[in-house]
Amino acid sequence: MIINRYIQRNIHFGTLGALAMLVSIGLFFLFVGELDDIGQGNYGVLQALGYVALSAPARIVEFMPLAVLLGSILSLGALAGNSEIIAMQASGISLRRMLAAVLQAALVLAALSFLIADWLVPDSEAGARALKNQAQQQSTALQFSEGLWIKDESRVVHIEAVLPNGYARKIEIYQLDDNGNLVSSLRAEHAVPLGDAWELQQVEQTIISARSSSSRSFDRMIYEGNLSHKLLQVLIIEPRIMSSMNLYSYLKFLDENGLDGHVERLIFWQKMLAPATIVIMCLLGFPFVLGSQRQSNTGQRLLTGILLGLVFVVLDRLLTQLGTQLSINAFTVALLPNLIFLALAIHLLLRKQSHGAGIGMFLAMGRRRYVDDPGAAEPVMPGVRTEKPPQVTDAKTNN
């Protein structure tokens, strides 16, 4: 419907404006932080700008909940300040119908944020880190979309994915002779750090000779190469910017090897519940624009949104730290901030709705009185001045 699309368009444009402002500020401070690294190797201003540009998708996902909250408060506040919300209610549009339009707009923004976080952020962050590392000449490794290639003496190592804490997935090791000919290869599903070496798991070894080749399988094998753990740490992608599928695979790998994955599991559930956070933020902005907006201005609404966003961030960080220290269930810790703010939004909405119901009852009683007594003045909205229409009488003529 036209009204629904009108409300959704205002929320989307308001969120886009708030997001552009927040992301611009975040990228500016990121660029300022990169100024100290300019001059290391071939890392110059253009490389720093490229690094900042590739970091933009991650900043979009990071600021999306706060941008939705600010955009909802400002855009809906502008409608309420222009009496458009009151006009919609007077025309028969219920509060539930307006709320449905707000939720539809929030779902679109939540889906967009999840797609960016799951599809765009992992590749963009990997590209940003590879650009910076290669420009600074910190390693001889080459990183492509299909994995990481490292030269280790007479061996060439290919790693499909470097996981946090030094773990790796799908490793290929090619052994070369003095003439550069391939003499053997190793393929392993996983690698676990073991001191200065790696423990390869589910290994298949192929020996290549001039006349034939043979293959053998091993459950585990120790690889004592000269791979720098510092190098691997530089190239590791943090769990927060991994895709949901890769993070789920990483959790499965940790469980299969009996490793602690509480922090990674908490990050996984926070990523899964991020769309719900955006919907709740949009819902939270709706009660603040109901009723009269004569006493509040744009600055006050903006300050309210920023304070609520900061409270949510502090609460989320506090619960995350407590959950990690006390080993509380990761799903519960990730869900609790959303439940608290959802309860706050419902409470404020019910208060506004009950207040609006009282006003509606008063107006209905006034209209009934006007119908029963045509001489009574019809109730009007605040700020609207009416005059009693002049009564028309028939002129009497004298014969």
Image: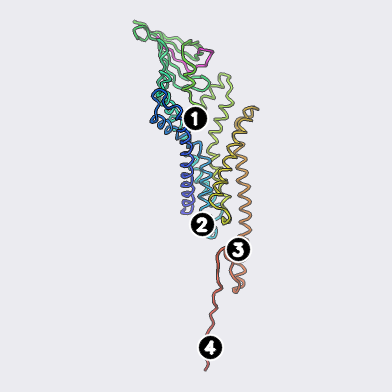
In primary-sequence order, the first of circles 2 and 4 is 2
- Which label is found at residue 241? 1
Please check the rendered image and state whether residue 190 is part of the magenta-colored stretch, yes or no: yes
**Residue 145 versus residue 25: which sits nearer the camera?**
25
**Residue type (three-letter) at the residue carrying disc 4:** Lys
For numbered disc 2, what is the local secondary structure?
loop
In primary-sequence order, the first of circles 3 and 4 is 3
Residue farthest to the right, as pictured: 326
Q: Comparing marks 3 and 2, which lies closer to the viewer?
A: 2
Residue corresponding to mark 2: 82
Lateral position of residue 1 relative to residue 361, left or right: left
Q: Would residue 332 be seen by someone viewing this image from the given angle?
A: no
For numbered disc 1, what is the local secondary structure?
helix
In primary-sequence order, the first of circles 1 and 2 is 2
**Residue type (three-letter) at the residue carrying disc 2:** Asn
Main secondary structure of the magenta stretch: strand
The percent coordinates of residue 249 (x first, y second) are: 51, 25
For numbered disc 4, what is the local secondary structure?
loop
Q: Is residue 320 above or below residue 343?
A: above
Contact? badges 3 and 2 (CB < 8 Å): no
In primary-sequence order, the first of circles 3 and 2 is 2
**Residue type (three-letter) at the residue carrying disc 3:** Leu
Q: Comparing marks 3 and 1, which lies closer to the viewer?
A: 1
The percent coordinates of residue 33 (x first, y second) are: 48, 31
Write down the region rendered in magenta: 184-197
- How busy is the neighbourhood of tag 3: few (under 14 within 10 Å), some, or many (20 plus)? some
**Residue type (three-letter) at the residue carrying disc 1:** Ile
Residue corresponding to mark 4: 396
For numbered disc 3, what is the local secondary structure?
helix
Residue corresponding to mark 3: 363
Q: Is residue 69 above or below residue 79?
A: above
